[in-house]
Amino acid sequence: MTMMDPDLPLSATHEVRDRCLCLHVQRAARVLARRFDDALRPFGLTNGQFSILMSLNRPDGPRLSDIAPLLGMDRSTLTAALKPLERAGLIAAAADTKDARAKRLSLTDLGRDRLKAALPVWRATHDAVDAGLSGIGPDDLRQGLMDVARGGRP
Amino acid sequence: MTMMDPDLPLSATHEVRDRCLCLHVQRAARVLARRFDDALRPFGLTNGQFSILMSLNRPDGPRLSDIAPLLGMDRSTLTAALKPLERAGLIAAAADTKDARAKRLSLTDLGRDRLKAALPVWRATHDAVDAGLSGIGPDDLRQGLMDVARGGRP
DNA sequence: CCGATATAGTTTGATATCAATATAAATGAC
DNA sequence: GTCATTTATATTGATATCAAACTATATCGG
């Protein structure tokens, strides 16, 4: 029988399991991602792709760097995530006329239609998640998550 | 100038951006993962690897299927995640004596030492995240995340 | 015992994720 | 105007993530 290391007691394991916000957030993120992925599968979208498409539904044609912070993503992650969407013809990229480095992203008609079709399902899933909260309301939960996503910066 | 589609108004985009718990959780998960990854990099661990190692700090030698739900992970994800840890000699797998299908996972001495060394840094990072919360306390936030991770089941 | 079903884990193929690095263009200092 | 710095994006290599399909073993009903 293996003895526990006295410098690394079971209580430390329980402390991490019970208290670690990082673990709690990662776990919730996995569960929620699966749930939204399931709901959006009939539309051929993942939860992340839905969020990206929705962030492009703006009249101004945002740049990659405009939406990366919105999604809390590294820009290189977003570069990679755009490829399947572009390949599927849901989004289009055009060179910025003012800044040759930048590219302006936009929804195609196909992408907009896809998004329009998925929106009611997103809404229903979202309402179901909200309804699953017990001790804390959705607004408070979002506030806490926004605090976390600020990353300790003012 | 592109007109907005009246069936997909800007208000829908703002609704998703401001209200979607899935998006909020994914964003917080990314930011928090980067933060813990940075803090744990000197130990050669990612936030997820730290959580996995810590979940193995038990006297009984848990099976893969015991810890996958704890982490909210798919079993196949965990299978893949264990490989670099085994390769690095931080964990070991042994056949279960009672059930030939199962494998019992355990920390090696090296893994335990690594975990012991990383624990104070984890604690400091964790405290800093807790301190960054404004409107809501860590306990309430964890409760909300646990509700979400329950996935709507009772 | 035997066949049906359930469980433990792996594999495959696709996407997601980041750090580090690279390339190109814009901006700022002088 | 020129050089240094910053900004915008892309590429690479590693790990993370899941669904679906697979193998092997266990369990259960008869």
Image: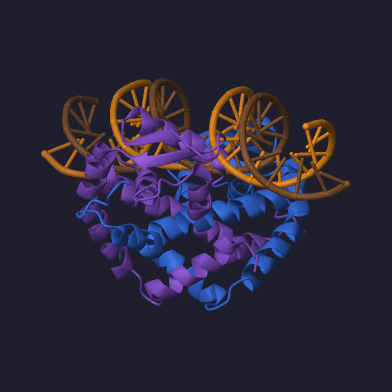
Chain colours: A purple, B blue, C brown, D orange
Q: Position of residue B79 (x, y in %)?
A: 50, 35
Query: Is B75 left or right of A77, judged from the image as shown?
Result: left
Decide which of C9, A137 is in the foreground and name it.
Answer: A137
Q: Residue at image x 50%, y 65%?
A: A145
B93 horizontally vs B22: left or right: right
Q: Which residue: 70% across, 33% down? A: B88
The image quarter containing residue B120 is bottom right
- Relative to residue C10, is residue B150 depicted above or below? below
Query: x, y (%) of residue A149?
Result: 55, 61
User: Residue at horizontal 33%, vertical 63%?
Assistant: B15
Give the answer, above or below, for where A136 lies relative to B66: below
Return the x and y of residue B17 as percentages of the image width and height: 39, 59
* Total numbered labels placed on residues in the image: 0
Q: Give the camera-side residue of B95 and B49.
A: B49
| The one of B19 and A136 positioned closer to us in this rendering | B19
Residue A17 visible at all: no
**Residue B87 seen:** yes
Quarter that holds the C terminus of chain B: bottom left
Left or right: A40 as drawn, with respect to B93: left
Question: Looking at this view, is C2 or A94 the one in front?
Answer: A94
Report x, y in % for residue B109: 75, 43
Q: Residue at x 45, y 40 (%)?
A: A104
